[in-house]
Amino acid sequence: MTDFTMQKDADGVAIITWDTVGKSMNVMSRDSMALLSDLVDDALADDAIKGIIITSGKDTFAGGMDLNVLASIRDESGDNPAQGLFDFTMAGHHMLRKVERAGMDPKTNKGGKPIAAALPGTALGIGLEVPLACHRIFAADNPKAKIGLPEIMVGIFPGGGGTTRLVRKLGAMAASPLLLEGKLNDPKKAMAAGVIDEVVPADELIAKAKEWVLSEPKIVKPWDEKGYKMPGGAPYHPAGFMTFVGASAMVNGKTQGVYPAAKALLSAVYEGALVPFDQALKIEARWFTNVLMNPSSSAMIRSLFINKEALEKGANRPEAPDQKVKKVGVIGAGMMGAGISLVSALAGIQVVLIDSTQEAADKGKSYTTAHLDKGIARKKVTEEKKEAVLGLINATTDYAALEGCDLIVEAVFEDVGVKAEVTAKVQAVTGPDCIFATNTSTLPITELAKASNDPEKFIGIHFFSPVDKMLLVEIIKGKETGPVAVAKALDYVRQIKKTPIVVNDERFFYANRCIIPYINEGIRMVKEGVEPALIENAAKLVGMPLGPLQLVDETSVDLGVKIAKATKAAMGDAYPDGEVDEVLFWMFDQERLGRKSNAGFYAYDEKGKREGLWEGLAAQYPTAEDQPDLTTVQHRLLFAQTLEAVRALEEGVLEDIREGDVGAILGWGFAPWSGGPFSWLDIIGAPYAAERCDQLTAEFGERFKTPDLLREMADKGQEFYKRFGQQAKAA
Ligand code: NAD
């Protein structure tokens, strides 16, 4: 069995079929690339062959490059990894250029054999770059298929000729959302955008491609003909000039300058547009290598692709039989319960949604109705699908309906007594194998498990709000939680297509533990007289999606007050955040509760649109004459989160740094360019991090104290991924 096979038929058409062994979706590896090249050589050299079709043996075309390959090439290239990556990229270009030229005479463009790509479904990354090198792209009329170049999402850009070809095909302006935002389209939209050429009924895909291949079509690409002009104009053309000025501003606006891939992409497009096609490919390869050599890109690939996928596939799942959920009971139909019901029913799981009144239960279910109605309006959901999904949710007050549930997710009020009462009521109905999960965000799991008749089957499954949008789910093991409960939670998270991390039970678990110090540091700076705009912009310029003050407004000042009071009660004199509370409680007293009251650290218009930072803040907390420099503010904000992550590792709350990094990016948007807090420490180096913490401690206080682990690693010159990564674990 090999990844590509070729069949030559009696009409003289060679059909090359991509079918990656042992994978549900095709991915390109080094070996498969060489194999495809050999098959194309064979077909081009065979006089009996008139044309070629490249298709897939699966119901999708391809998911992209195996990104592990890029990491391994860098590692294998010895002293000169850049050369290794560049040579690999150029080898890809040569192969695809061979497909594109297909044996044509270089001078006259005569001869050559037509090559069609026939895509049965999704075609992403190199899975679209191969078709873009072909002469015509056919796609099956499959609305679920996604077609596009999403590389930018993991910190690289299309380096298999996709950048150069798409810009030459569509023009820089039309190609920009596809390249810079990684926008994916269904086949019809991809055709309307000019990315593919024809959408045909699925059962006629190969026949239509074959008909075209045998029709003696013109195959020379526009950019290989004399007088080619780039659509929308090249950069030196007035219209093209405007495009690039605009694109450059847009990229910097969107990325705040912290994502190397977006800038490199723009450079590859701009410089490539000034030179002939083959040179443009070389420029693309140079910039691609430049990006791959940037530590940010490798950290992003590692966290957002390799490790995210490993966690989703159950990297930390204990040995246990399949725990797929068939019937889930969701208790509490408020904001969280409604979202949990929605994502469960969408995954085909039967849901019993319970609240104390029928009205509240129905209201929870109506969240799913509204979600599906929106889908119908956007033509993404059919009426039948809506009926089927709603049919899975039984909204009721009757606990007896929970009989037969194999998982319970409790999302009632954040109150130990209420939760204990619910636990007992549920367990009176459910069987001994049912796993009970709580969605608490602040209460210790071990404590809540005391209300359970079987703490081994009691666990935390912590969703983030809004449940349907947030990708991370934090699974929390109480002291007595057993492996089957962990496996159940992981299998459930996999069913609802989210990314899990598994952590141990300490105050605020992992995500909230790290995000609270970030918010607090922002508020503390307000108290010190740092310009609020400096705080917010410093956060964004270092890649945080929201500044700390905006984040308070979004999550609400009263929630902050509630958490502060509870934490203070639990910690007593050791409570370190009195200064923060002064500002927070004052905001509360002013009834500036954040977005929900249309008034917070920011001002809002009456429709709820955020305007600017609230000027009244300065009257209470005047800004100081001397303002700190940008880097100091950024370091305070980043170290506040990162040191908490290190402490969570030290204390064993985190058992795997991959979870620390992936959880940070997906859970609260920790500067994704960095790959997460541990990756960031590896980028800046433990010695520098420890030195910087010493300075911050001297200037701002003990909360920046270098954790022992970091100090030790600084002294030994260690890196987190070398010491705690998978290779270290395997050794
Ligand atoms: P919510 O107030 O919107 O909903 C709670 C629901 O529980 C209400 O509909 C209430 O009627 C119902 N309820 C209360 N007591 C009940 C009982 N005895 N039996 C049945 N139903 C009962 O609250 P929420 O924001 O959905 O939060 C629920 C849980 O999720 C809390 O533990 C909270 O800490 C946690 N959580 C919240 C968020 C968030 O952002 N809101 C995020 C993560 C976790």
Image (cartoon, rainbow, N blue to C red):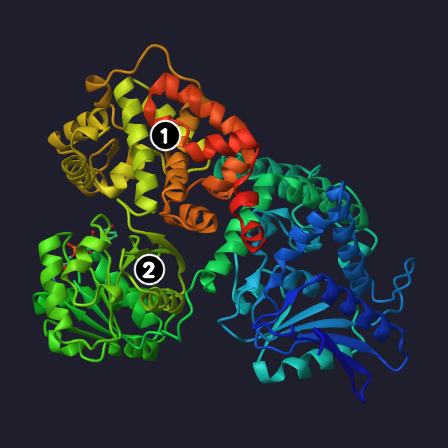
Relative side of 128 to 476, left or right: right
Kind of residue indicated by mark 2 = Asp
At horizontal 66% and vertical 41% (from top left) the residue drawn is 293
To which quarter of the image does residue 21 belong?
bottom right
x, y (%) of residue 48? 88, 82
Q: Residues within 10 Å of mark 1 (few under 14, many from 20)?
A: many
Amino acid type for the residue under numbered disc 1? Glu
Mark 2 vs mark 1: which is more N-terminal?
A: 2
Asked which secondary structure carries label 2, the reply is loop
Tell me which corner region of the image, top left, top right, bottom left or bottom right, holds residue 471: bottom left
Does the rendering let one see residue 433?
yes
Q: Ligand 1 is in which quadrant of the figure?
A: bottom left
Q: Are marks 2 and 1 in contact (CB under 8 Å)?
A: no
| Gap in angstroms between the C-alphas marked 2 and 1 | 27 Å
Q: Nearer the viewer, residue 731 or 567?
A: 731
Q: Is 191 above or below relative to 80?
A: below
Could you tell me which residue is drawn at 92 percent across and 57 percent down? 107
Taking depth in this image into account, of 435 and 197 the one nearest to the observer is: 435
Provide residue 45's location: percent of width, then percent of height: 89, 73
Which residue in the protein does label 2 denote? 468
Tell me if residue 471 can be seen: no
**Residue 536 bears which disc, if any?**
1
x, y percentage for residue 139?
A: 61, 73
Q: Please name whichever residue, 267 or 56, is drawn nearer the observer in this view of the structure.
A: 56
Q: Residue furthest top?
A: 625
Q: Mark 1 falls on what kind of element?
A: helix
Count of picture labels: 2
